[in-house]
Amino acid sequence: MREPMNKIRITRMTVDHLPAIVEIEKAVFPDPWSYESFVEAISLSEKCWIAQKGPTVIGYLITQWVMDEIHILNVAVSPDRQRQGVGAALLEYLLDIARQSGMRDVYLEVRMSNQAAQALYTKYAFAQLAVRKRYYRDGEDARVMHRSLISLSPSEESEDTGCNDLGMARQSYGARMV
């Protein structure tokens, strides 16, 4: 059952949330980030959010903002809350803030095998930009996806081919999508 958006609260991530976040991370990813990686992400960026239902952390989103681009580094939803609108709520929150802040582009990597996440991103107008071979530790390829935040006229939109140079510095902890 899809969670009503007004029941999901999105707030800034803090170190106090990390025990719940690390638990979700370990439940979702075969090669989870360490506690220290989350501490580093929070210290390097104010652009980390959690989704809560009541007092319970049910998902999170970590991004890197460079100039006018955003790179989604990590996003996950608790396994018992997946496919209930939590990921969509986090993504909508990010896109709204990004537009208000004058950002131009959003990039992410997603596992080739993660069809559910790819469908969500496609629903929010992300398109495939490239494939990164053997991107993940287990050797799986990643689909690089991009979303422009610039409002284009219909004729300009059909001519938009995306960006050839991502211009994004990789963080030591890597990027993933669930």
Image (cartoon, grey):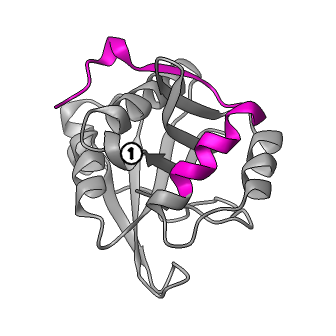
Estimate the x, y position of residue 4 in percent, counting from the top left: 26, 18
Residue extending farthest to the top is: 6
- Coordinates of residue 170 in the picture (x, y in percent): 68, 65
Using a 10 Å C-alpha cutoff, classify the residue at mark 1 as few (fewer than 14 neighbours), some (14 to 19) or many (20 or more).
Answer: many
Q: Which residue is mark 1?
A: 147
Task: Tell whether position 141 is magenta.
Answer: no
Instruction: Identify which residue, 163 or 11, lies in the foreground.
Output: 11
- Can residue 152 be seen in the rendering of this structure? yes
Q: What residue sits 53% from the left and 18% below the top?
A: 100
| Foreground pick, 144 / 166 | 144
Residue type, numbered disc 1: Arg
User: At 23% from the left edge and 62% from the top edge, which residue is drawn?
Assistant: 115
* Residue drawn at point x = 39 percent, y = 71 percent: 130
**Magenta span contains residue 18:** yes
Span of residues in magenta: 1-25
Q: Is residue 29 above or below residue 116?
A: below
Dividing the image into 4 quarters, which one contains the C terminus? bottom left
Judged from the image, the secondary structure of the residue bearing numbered disc 1 is strand
